[in-house]
Amino acid sequence: MKLLSLTTLLAMGTLLVSHHANSNVLFSLENLERERASYLHLMTNSALSADERLRQSKQTYRRMVDMERMVLRDERITQSDAPMVKNAFSRYELTFLAHASAESQRIPYSHWLFTLNITSEVLGRSKIGGR
Amino acid sequence: MKIRKLTLCCAMTILWMSACSVASEWQPQASDKLMTLPANIIEKRIEQDFSASPMARRLADLDSQMQDKTARIDQLQNSLQTADQGTLADVKYALVQEKSDYLDLLQESHQLRKQASMQKQQVYQQVLQKFRHQQTTANGSTRIQLKQKQEAALARMEKVMAEVDQNLIHAGFNQTSPYADEYAGNLAQIEQLKKAIASHQGNASPTLNGAQVSSEEYLRQLLMDIAMHRSLLDQEGLMLSYMARLVALDAQELEYQLAYGDSADGNKTGVVNQASQAVDLFIL
């Protein structure tokens, strides 16, 4: 009887651990990706006024900071070898935009453009055409 | 009749009997479930599995039968001292028979112990092989590389954290975010939980002579113990063959005695009437 209840306890413990391990491990990374996409969209949206863009970008920046920290402290993420995780860690400059931009002393948007080598000169040389 | 039986007994003792009962089998497997256990528990589990097997039951049965035979042989050896001429041959015959039976039991027990030892060795080798495979896969896996990258990225992030917090203050966020507050509160508790897990007895490494060792080292030690045990069993096999030889010689000697009697009397030829001894009958 004692052995049976111990086995049940062990099974419950294992279930809890596996539930923790199997819950969507990419949740925090997916949120970060969405927030960054939203930030970049915000910065490139010509329909917004400068004040509105600044106000909204501050809010987004704050959320990005939190989410980047969450992703880097989330031990479950590395349990997945999905391409999304591999890309995220192989391109620190682009994934962790808020912190990487602080390193380079630029605002996040400028840092993103700089990392992708999108400069005024490159844009000036570019031509419009179909792919 | 006795002579025929003795000859049969002699032949049976010299020949190794290899036929073991199917009912005395034990077939352990290095299952995936077994691999999840700590090395010292794997050992206990295998021993427990063996104890419950038909092979272990047969060994216990043989052991009990051998004890009975030993007592009977002791009894007959005592009778040998006191037996008179008329019953001596019967006692000797019974003694050889009992010794032969005892050797049959001992041989079966020896074979089973050897088989069990080999099977244990195979299981531990399989476990060790799987364990090494797991270790190699885990060390070279993408997940480990990702983990290392995450740690490097975290270290890099921590260097600029204060600066980023300063940027947030400049942006007008004077209060820390709910996540940052909660995180700081939880961090110390998580560390305590991690420490408790690391120091938990159930998570402790197996020990050898009081010293903690890795699972691989523990398994290697188990294999070494089995190798030593098998070496002793080989020695025991040699002893068994010498004992069988002695019983065969006893049986042969008894067979000759029953067939030809004692050598002292057997060589005497009967008195033959000769012509020289009868000469006097004719000349007087």
Image (spheres, rainbow, N blue to C red):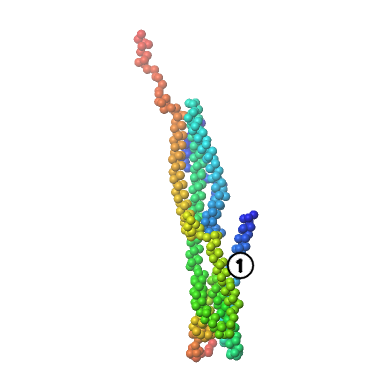
Q: Position of residue A117 (x, y in %)?
A: 49, 85
Q: Is residue A28 above or below residue B65?
A: below
Is residue B31 shown left or right of residue B234?
right
Q: Position of residue B83 (x, y in %)?
A: 49, 28
Is residue B88 shown left or right of residue A21?
left
Q: Callout 1: residue from which chain?
A: A
Q: How many marks?
A: 1
Q: Is residue B66 above or below residue A66?
A: above
Q: Residue at x 53, y 88 (%)?
A: A129
Q: Is A129 or B25 nearer to us in this picture?
A: B25
Rendered-image quadrant of the C terminus of chain B = top left
Q: Is residue B211 above or below residue A96?
A: above
Q: Is A53 or B183 nearer to us in this picture?
A: B183
For label 1, count other residues whose C-alpha is less than 10 Å away and answer few (under 14), some (14-19) or many (20+): few
Q: Amino acid at mark 1?
A: His
Where on the picture, by quarter, is residue B166? Answer: bottom right
Q: Residue at x 57, y 78 (%)?
A: A66
What residue did someone put label 1 on? A19
Q: Position of residue B48 (x, y in %)?
A: 56, 52
Q: Position of residue B96 (x, y in %)?
A: 48, 35
Asked whether residue B112 is in view, the answer is yes
Asked whether residue B22 is in view, the answer is no
Q: Residue at x 52, y 56 (%)?
A: B40
Q: Is residue A127 above or below residue B70?
A: below
Under circle 1, the secondary element is: helix
Q: Residue at x 48, y 67 (%)?
A: B140
